[in-house]
Amino acid sequence: MAAEERSQHGVWGPHELGYAVHDLDVRATSSAGGTGLMVACSSFIPDAANFVEVMTFGFSAPQGIKNSVRLPHYFPCTRVRWLRSGSGKELLATSGDYLRVWSASGELCRLLRHEANPHGVCTPITSVDAAPGSSPSGQSLASCDIYGICALWDLETGAMTQALDLGQPLSDVAFGPDGVLAVVGERGDCFMMDPRQPQDVAVFAPRTRRVSGPARIAWGAHRPDLFAVSWQGDAGALVLYNGLLHQPKQTPIVIKSTSSATVSDLCWSHAHPELLACAREDGIVDVWQFSEAGLESASACSGPGFSWAPRGEQGANCTALAMSPEVRPGHHVLVMATMPPGQPGPEGQEASASGGALYLAGLPSPVAKQQQRRPQDHSAVPASAQPAGIVGVA
């Protein structure tokens, strides 16, 4: 790992990529060489062939990136998702013109074709997610597309088992920890269903102010009660939804930010279920701490527990964000992709076609409720909330 890529405050980066990142996902890995992370990044390169790059990062300072492989994906890949495998084999699902399943070494294992659509051509699939708690044998996937179709897939056979028309272009799909599925549309609607009873689709009460545009969902592996959504047209707002399908529906809670910068990506912590990281297009990451007592309790949160931005990245756009699984008990790593301002980038952002970098930062544990406060800006972070470092976590 190059010395210039490591700061003095537990942050590793920038690792220059040479391309803008549209989406990324992270999983922990271990080998004889120690513990590390596998990071999958989808490229956004206008008017050129794209790819998904899989990089293995070691936590030992001298090692850095152990290896890297690129998976060809001519059109920009809209989502990358590591599959929850009990076999020890790393598999990656990607969405775009088709659904693809890859090995971490770059072998294309399966191509899932979405044949049925209104136009009779390959369907632009906007997102994919894998059902929790399953192995690749018989694993279920869910996808959504711009024609409004939410589809369920059997990975073992490659067959589409259900196709539901939700009546509007769909932006994102996510499984909750109990296997319930959430889908968001570009007209501001949010849908929820149980794949075992896909004919019963719940539609959340519409918000008082209609929003539109691409959206992102975050549903934590340990938060069945709550999931979060951000819409590009929502001026930095964060929307919290009740994730309990069989309870009376609650009106979603809209949390306004002091910044109007769009939330480009968001992710719950695997180590601390109450923490939600939201990456904004202005390059700042807000980390919120929401009570585990449900939606109403979460609404009492007045602001992020702390905010963070990489030094020297003033004006950079944040394009993608992911949180690692626990690298050791109570410790997790935030992975963020940035790109400099310039040409149009993913989701309408302004970005340079030749730029793009990754940062890895160890995050602190949640603070006690009475200690939470809202920093005035991203440089005024409480000392207890500084990035905790990623060296020596093995």
Image: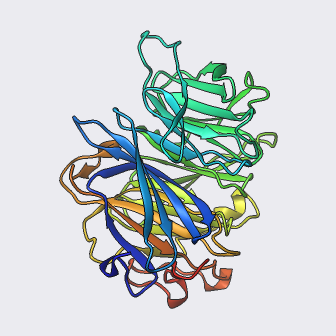
Above or below residue 240? Residue 173 is above
Residue placed furthest toward the left:
342
Left or right: 184, with 290 as reference point = left
Residue placed furthest toward the front:
32
* Towards the viewer: 327 or 347: 327
* Residue 263 visible, this angle: yes
| Quarter of the image that includes the N terminus | bottom left
Q: Position of residue 231 (x, y in %)?
A: 45, 45
Residue in the picture at 29% in, 49% down: 349
* Towards the viewer: 382 or 142: 142
Left or right: 15, with 228 as reference point = left
| Quarter of the image that includes the C terminus | bottom right
Q: Can you tell which quarter of the image residue 166 is in?
A: top right
Q: Position of residue 182 (x, y in %)?
A: 64, 39
Residue placed furthest toward the right:
246
Residue in the picture at 55% in, 88% down: 384
* Residue 209 visible, this angle: no
Residue in the picture at 41% in, 38% down: 77
Above or below residue 87? Residue 36 is below
Left or right: 300, with 294 as reference point = left
What coloring was used for the rendering?
A: rainbow
Q: Position of residue 364 (x, y in %)?
A: 58, 79
**How many circles with numbers are drawn on the protein?**
0
Q: Position of residue 205 (x, y in %)?
A: 63, 37
Residue in the picture at 67% in, 82% down: 368
